[in-house]
């Protein structure tokens, strides 16, 4: 078995008296993809924040390529190879798509001049956004803003990519192209952790699925087995929270 690239062990997180994560563990090898589902407020984004280093955990460890990075911040983790996209894209809207990606390559990956420009353009090509390189980011439609989120994560030359609802809000017709891009990353050996309510997109990519509820791992394993688990059906797939219910349609 390939040695894990990312190991998250026994992570806990509280906000005041609210326990948001309790003893969450998983490990990922290069080229593995883990999907995370769960109801609103289950702690999914908080888990990504702990892995990315934007939030310190109250317990547990995050180990990247054998190095304990639990005590390091987001900038160090980014340079160490953890890239992420955010649930709500917030590009620098007055800058072009290329300039936004260049900022990620320069300040995220610490690259300079020509190397930063090359990394930024390569990320745009991978994300399928190079034809919009000179477009102001503020004028992009949602699919392209999502692609820019992905490109900004890729410009940091990550070995692990954390995706937070990158397919959220897209039309059914727009999802397959994004799925194909993420499948390509996985084929290239990038490890992916992907939170998503568009469940059919997740299932097309991930080899393992974890369902979180109230900050605890309710089920983890082969995606279709997890989705068929009666406890997952009860707490997640049966959920009817307006605007954020899981989407189970088919991805070609
Ligand atoms: N900075 C914070 N301070 C206090 N409470 C927070 C903070 N961030 C998140 N929470 C709370 O932690 C819980 C988990 O939030 P989180 O965003 O991780 O859930 P989620 O599973 O990602 O939900 P969603 O699917 O709606 O994005 C929620 O109750 C949320 O209100």
Image (cartoon, rainbow, N blue to C red):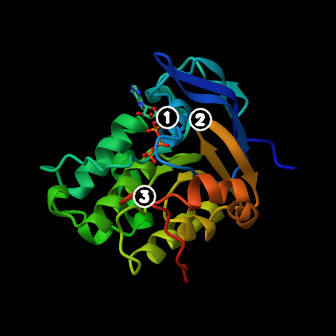
Ligand 1 rendered quadrant:
top left
Quarter of the image where one finds residue 110:
top left
Rendered view: 159 above or below 242: above
Q: Are marks 3 and 2 in contact (CB under 8 Å)?
A: no
Q: Residue 191 location, x and y as percent? A: 63, 51
| Residue ID at (35%, 43%) | 104
The answer to whether the residue bearing label 3 lies less than 8 angstroms from the nearest atom of ligand 1 is no
Instruction: In the displayed orientation, state which residue is furthest to the left.
Output: 94
Kindly report the distance in space between the C-alpha atoms of the residues bearing marks 3 and 2.
Answer: 21 Å
Residue 46: numbered disc: 1
As measured in the structure, the alpha-carbon distance from the residue carrying label 2 to the one carrying label 1 is 9 Å
**Which of 53/78 is in front?**
53
Q: Which residue is mark 3?
A: 166
* Quarter of the rendering occupied by the C terminus: bottom right
Tag 1 and tag 3, C-beta contact below 8 Å:
no
Q: Is residue 32 visible?
A: no
**Picture layout, residue 226 above or below residue 200:** above
Closer to the camera: disc 1 or disc 3? 1
Identify the secondary structure beneath mark 2.
loop
Check disc 2 and report the residue beneath it.
215
Dot 1 or dot 3, earlier in sequence: 1
Marked residue nearer the N-terminal end (3 or 2): 3
* Label 1 within 8 A of ligand 1 by Cβ: yes
Judge by depth and name the residue closer to the eye, 132 or 216. 216
For ligand 1, tell me if the residue under mark 2 lies within 8 Å: yes
Residue sitting at x 50%, y 28%: 53
Marks 1 and 2: in contact by CB < 8 Å? yes
Q: Position of residue 76 (x, y in %)?
A: 49, 26
Dot 3 falls on a residue whose secondary structure is loop
């Amino acid at each position: 078995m390939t040695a894990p690239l990312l190991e998250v062990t026994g992570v806990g997180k509280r906000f005041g008296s609210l326990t948001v994560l309790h003893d969450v563990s998983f490990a990922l090898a290069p080229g593995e993809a883990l999907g995370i589902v769960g109801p609103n407020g289950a702690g999914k984004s908080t888990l990504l924040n702990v892995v990315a280093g934007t939030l310190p955990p109250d317990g547990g460890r995050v180990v990247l390529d054998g190095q304990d990075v639990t005590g390091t911040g987001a900038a160090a983790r980014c340079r160490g190879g953890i890239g992420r996209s955010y649930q709500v894209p917030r590009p620098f809207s007055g800058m072009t798509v290329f300039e936004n990606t260049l900022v990620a390559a320069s300040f995220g990956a610490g690259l300079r001049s020509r190397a930063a420009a090359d990394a930024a353009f390569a990320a745009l090509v991978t994300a399928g956004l190079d034809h919009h390189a000179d477009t102001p980011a503020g004028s992009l439609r949602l699919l392209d803003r999502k692609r820019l989120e992905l490109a900004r994560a890729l410009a940091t030359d990550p070995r692990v990519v954390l995706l937070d609802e990158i397919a959220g809000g897209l039309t059914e017709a727009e999802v397959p192209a994004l799925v194909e891009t993420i499948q390509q990353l996985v084929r290239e050996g990038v490890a992916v952790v992907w939170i998503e309510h568009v469940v059919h997109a997740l299932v097309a990519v991930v080899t393992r699925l974890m369902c979180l509820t109230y900050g605890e791992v309710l089920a983890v394993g082969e995606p279709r087995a997890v989705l068929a688990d009666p406890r997952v059906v009860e707490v997640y797939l049966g959920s009817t929270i307006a605007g954020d219910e899981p989407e189970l349609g088919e991805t070609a």
